[in-house]
């Protein structure tokens, strides 16, 4: 299979997916390569910080974020965890520095209890809606470093072998 795009983004984590969305909205033809064949279910982030949530809202993903947060609350309720109460007392952190609720001037800005898998699902759906191909099972050589457009990519079935681009993330 061969495909010519303006930018190949390596990695379908939150950063790669959002970058691909931004590039597409900016007019670039883009695709994403991900070495894993399925979403990573390992424990990663349990929440999205206030500024990240705001950025997603600006890009029209606010309601999807709210729905995903509601699912988090619903899942925790049987265990008696008062997630909604915690949400409004704990304002989140920036680089692990707690955001003080008494210094908060914009209370609508808050972290969202959406875990990384939930966030990747939201971004993946948005990418699909924008017709961005996320090709799984493709390992780009040299990690995320730029390399020659003629370098081959590896995949178990050769599905990535002919992909080329003018730029790499
Ligand atoms: C326990 C834990 C708790 C955390 N809590 C929070 C939190 O509360 N809030 C928060 O904001 N952050 C949190 N983080 C950090 C957050 O998980 C990372 O900041 C986030 O994963 C970074 O996103 P990313 O897309 O850059 O990288 P990743 O999520 O690591 O995604 C990179 C992707 O690139 C793929 N890839 C890598 N190399 C290649 C290659 N050569 N070819 C093809 N694909 C490749 C990988 O398979 C992966 O899917 C936490 C992390 C951990 C581990």
Image (cartoon, rainbow, N blue to C red):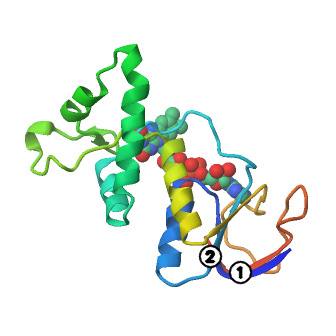
In the rendered image, residue 41, in percent from the top left (x then y), is placed at 62, 37
Q: Secondary structure at mark 1?
A: strand
Q: Residue at x 29, y 41 (%)?
A: 93
Q: CA distance from mark 2 to mark 1?
A: 9 Å
Q: Earlier in the sequence, mark 2 or mark 1?
A: 2
Residue 4 shows in this picture:
yes
**Image quarter hosting the N terminus:** bottom right
Q: Is residue 162 above or below residue 96?
A: below
Q: Quadrant of residue 68?
A: top left
Choose between 146 and 25: the one closer to the eye. Answer: 25
For residue 105, side relative to residue 72 (left or right): left
Q: Residue furthest right?
A: 157
Rendered image: mark on residue 165 = 1
Rendered image: mark on residue 30 = 2
How many C-alpha atoms fall within 10 Å of the one at disc 1: few (<14), some, or many (≥20)? some
For residue 81, side relative to residue 45 (left or right): left
Q: Residue at x 71, y 80 (%)?
A: 165
For residue 27, side relative to residue 108 (left or right): right
Q: Is mark 1 within 8 Å of ligand 1?
A: no
In the rendered image, residue 88, in percent from the top left (x then y), is placed at 20, 34
Q: Residue at x 90, y 64 (%)?
A: 158
Choose between 24 and 146: the one closer to the eye. Answer: 24
Residue 48 shows in this picture:
no
In the rendered image, residue 96, in percent from the top left (x then y), is placed at 33, 39
Q: Secondary structure at mark 2?
A: strand
Q: Is residue 18 above or below residue 4?
A: above
Q: Quadrant of residue 85?
A: top left
**Image quarter hosting the C terminus:** bottom right
């Amino acid at each position: 299979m061969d495909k010519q795009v303006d930018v190949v983004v390596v990695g379908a984590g939150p950063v790669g997916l959002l970058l691909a969305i931004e590039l597409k909205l900016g007019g670039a033809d883009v695709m994403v390569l991900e070495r894993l064949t399925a979403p990573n279910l390992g424990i990663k982030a349990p929440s999205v910080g206030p500024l990240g949530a705001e950025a997603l809202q600006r890009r029209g993903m606010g309601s999807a974020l709210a729905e995903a947060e509601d699912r988090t609350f619903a899942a925790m309720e049987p265990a008696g965890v008062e997630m909604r109460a915690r949400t409004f007392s704990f304002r989140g952190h920036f680089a692990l520095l707690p955001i003080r609720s008494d210094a908060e001037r914009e209370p609508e800005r808050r972290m969202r209890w959406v875990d990384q898998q939930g966030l990747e699902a939201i971004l993946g759906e948005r990418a699909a809606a924008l017709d961005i191909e996320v090709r799984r099972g493709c390992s780009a050589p040299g990690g995320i470093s730029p390399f020659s457009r003629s370098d081959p990519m590896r995949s178990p079935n050769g599905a990535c072998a002919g992909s080329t681009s003018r730029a790499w993330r």
